[in-house]
Amino acid sequence: MEEQQSGKIIVHVDNDLADLIPGYLFNRKKDIAAIHDALEKKDLETIRILGHSMKGSGGGYGFENITDIGMLIEKAAKEGRDEDILLQIKRLEDYLLQVEVLYD
């Protein structure tokens, strides 16, 4: 579950996932760099795959916004819309800066 609190996005995650979450969020930062690199190379298929992966994994860890961003990246890559990809990458960067995880 995600909620806003004083400039932070609070995400409640099951305590059983505590060991996995830091790596998961770090990998999303790596995805940002990979998507920028793929954009420079006009490699929309790699971007589509990365978006698809985010779409599939976000909700499972409690990060609904990552699922949404991944879905939009995947769609934009399929349609060749670089500007929309860049908008979603900025949204993901902002999200990662604001997210705070609480383990329940």
Image: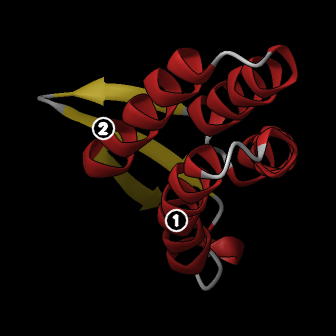
Residue 65 lies, in percent from the top left, at: 57, 30
Instruction: Residue lying at the far bottom in this picture: please name it.
Output: 19
Q: Residue 90 carries which label?
A: none
Q: In this view, does 70 lie to the left or right of 93?
A: right
Q: Where on the picture, by quarter, is residue 21?
A: bottom right
Q: Which of 62 and 65 is in front in this view?
A: 65
Q: Quadrant of the N terminus?
A: top right
Instruction: Kindly identify which residue carries mark 2.
Output: 94
Q: Which colour scheme is used?
A: secondary structure
The image shows residue 22, relative to residue 36, as above or below, that is below
Q: Quadrant of the C terminus?
A: bottom right
Residue 98 lies, in percent from the top left, at: 26, 43
The image shows residue 8, relative to residue 86, as above or below, that is below
Q: In this view, does 42 lie to the left or right of 101?
A: right
Q: How crowded is mark 1: few (under 14 residues within 10 Å), some or many (20 or more)?
A: some
Instruction: Kindly identify which residue carries mark 1.
Output: 25
Q: What element carries label 1?
A: helix
Which numbered disc flags the more N-terminal residue, 2 or 1? 1
Q: Nearer the viewer, residue 49 or 79?
A: 79
Query: In the image, what residue occupies the spot 51% across and 27% down?
Result: 88
Q: How far apart, in angstroms, are the residues tagged by discs 2 and 1?
A: 13 Å
Query: In the image, what residue occupies the spot 48% across and 37% down?
Result: 89
Residue 9 lies, in percent from the top left, at: 33, 36
Q: Is residue 69 visible?
A: yes
Question: Could you tell me the amino acid type at mark 2?
Answer: Asp
Q: Is residue 31 left or right of residue 8?
A: right
